Every structure is written in structure tokens, then in C-alpha cells.
Amino acid sequence: MNTTPRDVVVIGGGANGLVAAATLAQGGLKTLLIERDEVLGGQGRLVEFAPGFRAAPLAMDSGWLPEPIAAGLGMERPRHAGTDADVAVAVEPGRFLALSRDPAKSAEAIRAHSAADAARWPEFVGRLRKLAGFLEALYVTPAPDISASAPAELIPLLGLARKFRGLGRRDSIELLRTLPLSVWELAADWFESAPLQAAIASGGIQEHRHGPRAGGTGFVLLHHLTGAAPGAIRGRTPCSSEAFTRAAAETARRFGVDVRCGAAAQQIEIRDYGVSGVVLGSGEVIPTPTVLSTASPATTFLDWLDPVWLDPEFLHAVANIRYRGCSTYVAYALERLPDLPGLADGALDGTVSLTSSVPALERAADASKYGTVAERPHVEFTIPSRVAPDLAPSGKHVLVARAQYTPYRLRDGVWDSGRRDAMAQAVTAAIEAVSPCFSSRILHRAAWTPLDLEERFGLREGATSQGELGLDQILFMRPVAGWGGHTTPIAGLYTGGAGSHPGPGVLGGAGWLAARRMLRDRRS
């Protein structure tokens, strides 16, 4: 069954898909957006895991919406919560190191552990802000093409060079040093306090299978600080993922995008090395000469395309992309807020990390190298109902925890209900160690292992990054070397998901750049 032809079909109703569709429709194209789930939101979508309790388990970090995207689409920015809580590290039962987005407040908290560290803190967070700011500028421009030769193609490279020079000699050197550095070395270079080092290092291993000793985790830290407030070392200012999805969907519909949920792509039809349509799981065929996919590169090229149309070397490169999901998420429906002795109530608006030293983080990562679950996993949690009270019934709360490291591929079997329950219990025990009587306040809990994330959210190997943030998988090498400009070997097929430049956590970033590339190609 064929339907009405469209100028372009956007696959995926997450942040990238919504922004891409809005941008294309704004550019005058008859645009259809299809989403396999019954609701929009992608990784940021809400899940009702117990009656009256909802959570976006994969949106512990709200992400960064770049100003050029919001301004260009006239999108209303979601309101942020008025809090300066950043990350609190459990030092021992009844004692925490609570850091704020206010450098002076953080320095005061650090002073109880080290006067020298307190004195260095403002300089450190100021340096991180400058370096992350460079990435912010990089992430709203097309990935630099180092093979460019035509004058027009050299413009992005010249712009990048100007931004780099703008850092100044000292900060430009520090950027080149930090990107390949391990976050363990970065933290140890600056500070002596073990919990402070752990607070920094845990930001460099988010959704990353390697531990803090691994090279390139300095870059991972900076990547997750793009869009963060000055003084922060963990993520962006919290806001409701539902609020962003609603704003993006309203913007897309305002420009005339046709949105269809419950419509799963099954195949991208190719004719003479160019796109001719999209086949849905229902058998329906949507004729179109152009497709923008926000799915993972493996899904787009290995599952939806007949390999006869692709070069074997390209297919080999796509098959070798590292995904390596390593996190299990647990959502709790709570009768009331947990008690955390030693932690001020306001700190619950931020992230609470339960690993007090960098060596403990590394030991947790070691297990995943051999396909086993860490005996003492690294657990962090947020309480999103503090920011969005409507996620839970009045007086009750939602807590979402992430546990690393839980590898997608297990050495001695596969993830099943028994292993999932055991993992959820281990997370519960870790929280109860710092929050007495936590278990007694649990009304219900739900857990998602890497396998569940693949099946429920369509994430290859359970990787929310759609491709690990290694230095060989960023910029013009994302998704694969030579194809970082959102185009593909297939005419009319573009990639605009988190597996493309600039990667995860930049709300709509890849979709916006891919849509702009498509519009530019059509004009030329």
C-alpha cells in the first residue's frame, strides 16, 4: 500500500528528529515524521512505570539546547528549575561533599576536606567553562572536513581555527592536553581530596564503558559540560524532558510537519543508488526521494538497507562502530523523599553520586572488561519529581538511578528477569547504605538493563550515545571516518541522530545540522 509522496521523511521522534523535521518544514519541504513508539520524545520520553508515577529514565541529564537552534526555529525554551545544586558525593554514611553551581559555595564545602583544593576550585571550574565553551562553538557548526580543498569547503576549518586562537595560548594548550587525557589524571593534577576527585571523574565516565584511567575521558567530561552553567561540573541545569518534547513538537507542527506515532520504519527503499521510499512495519510504503534517519548508524545501514547498495568497506566501518552500552537504570516510586543524613535538602535537586574515590570507579569498570557486572557498581541518582512534581502523585516522589558498569554482553549468559532483579536489588542496597529505611519507602520499582534499552528504546546494545564517545568516533569520524557531514553513500539519505556529529546530549544538534545540510544540497 502506497501513501501520498513526501518531500522528506524523518525517522525518529526524539529531540533530533523533531528539530530536523521543524527545520526542513521551515525550509519549505513537505515533511513527514514517523516514530515507532506511541509517544514522542525518544530517549527523553516519559514512561509510566507504576500507576501515577512517570519518569524519563534516560534523561537524568536534561541536555543542552543551543541558542542558534532555539532562536532559528522560534522555539520556546523550557523553563529551568531555580536551583544551584550540582553533584553530591557520598564520602561515608552520614557525610557528603555537596558541590554547587556557585563556585564560592563549592569552595566552602571543599574546605572541610582540603584548604588547598578549595583555593584552586574557582580557577578549575573557570578553565572547564572555557574549554567546554569551545566545544559549544564547534557543536553548532558542521564537522570540519580535513580533506576539504575547495574554497567554500575551507570556511568551516578557518572558522574553527579562529575559535581555537580565541582561547589564547594558555587555554588552547590546556584544551589539547585535556581532550586525550584520562579524567583520573585531570582530577589528580588539580586536587588532593579523594571525594572531590571522584566528583570530577564520575562526570567523565557517563555512559562510557571505560573507567577513569582511560585516555579520552577528559574529552567525555568536557562533552557533558557543554551548555552547563559556570561553576558546574555535572551536566546541565535540570528541566523536564517532557517540556522540551512538547515545545519541539509544537514548533514542528507550527511549520506544518505531519507527525505519525506508532509507525515503525522497517526498510529504506533504494532505486539506482538513491532513496525511493520508506517501508513501515505494517507494509505501508511512503514514497519519498529523501530520508533523514535519527536511528543508530547500525540500524540505518545494517538493518534498513539492502547491503548490495553499499560499498563493503563502508559496511565494515559501520559494523565496527563501538556502542557498548554499560548502564542499568532503575526507577523508584517512593512514598516520600528519602532521608540522607548529612546532606542538605537542597542538594537533592542535583545528582547524588555514591562512589567516594576514583580507584573505586576504576574497580567498577574493571568487571565490564570481562563481561561481568561490578560487585560494587557505581550508582548515581536524581529525584526528577523535585523539578517536575507532576511526575508523581501529591506528596510522593520519583527517584531514578543509573548503575555502571553492566555490560550488554555478559560472559556467562544473557540478561533475563532474574539478572535484572538482582541488579535492581544491588542498586537499592547501594542507596540504602546512605539512606536508612530507603527500602521501606519504595512503592514500586522498574529496571532497564542494556538489553531492555535495546528492545524498549531501540538503542543498539543499550548505548544511549548511539556510539561511544571515543576520540576516534567524534567530529568528521562520526559515525565513520569520511562521512561526518550527515550525508551517506546513498543519494537522498542523511543521518541526524546522536550517532552523528555532534553526538549525544546536544538537543537537536545533529538533526539541525543534518537538515541544514539537506536544504543546502537541494538549493545547490
Image (tube, rainbow, N blue to C red):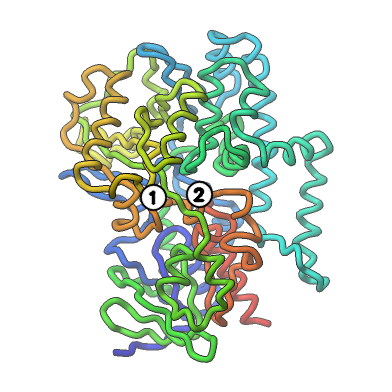
Name the residue nearer the viewer: 264 or 473.
473
Query: Marks 1 and 2, how far apart in space?
Result: 16 Å
Name the residue nearer the viewer: 329 or 335.
329
From the image, state whether disc 1 or disc 2 is nearer to you. Answer: 2
Q: Give the amino acid at mark 2.
A: Gly
- Tell me where residue 182 sits by quadrant: top right
- Relative to 124, say whether 105 is above or below: above
- Relative to 279, say whether 512 is above or below: above
Q: Which residue is mark 1?
A: 243
Q: Can residue 312 be seen in this snapshot?
A: yes
Query: Picture coordinates of residue 276 (x, y %)?
Result: 46, 87
Q: Residue at x 37, y 49 (%)?
A: 408
Instruction: Say whether marks 1 and 2 touch (CB < 8 Å).
Output: no
Query: Picture coordinates of residue 218 (x, y %)?
Result: 62, 37
Q: Residue at x 45, y 32 (%)?
A: 82
- Tell me where residue 340 sits by quadrant: top left
Q: Residues within 10 Å of mark 2 (few under 14, many from 20)?
A: many
Name the residue nearer the viewer: 11 or 512.
11
Q: Give the amino acid at mark 1.
A: Ala
Q: Is 64 positioned to the left or the right of 245 in the image?
A: right
Quadrant location, the N terminus:
bottom left
Mark nearer the N terminus (1 vs 2): 1
Name the residue nearer the viewer: 364 or 247.
364
Q: Is 16 positioned to the left or the right of 520 in the image?
A: left
Q: Residues within 10 Å of mark 1 (few under 14, many from 20)?
A: some
Q: Which residue is mark 2?
A: 505
Which type of secondary structure does the marked residue at label 2 adopt? Answer: loop
Which type of secondary structure does the marked residue at label 1 adopt? Answer: helix
Q: Residue at x 44, y 59 (%)?
A: 248
Quadrant location, the C terminus:
bottom right
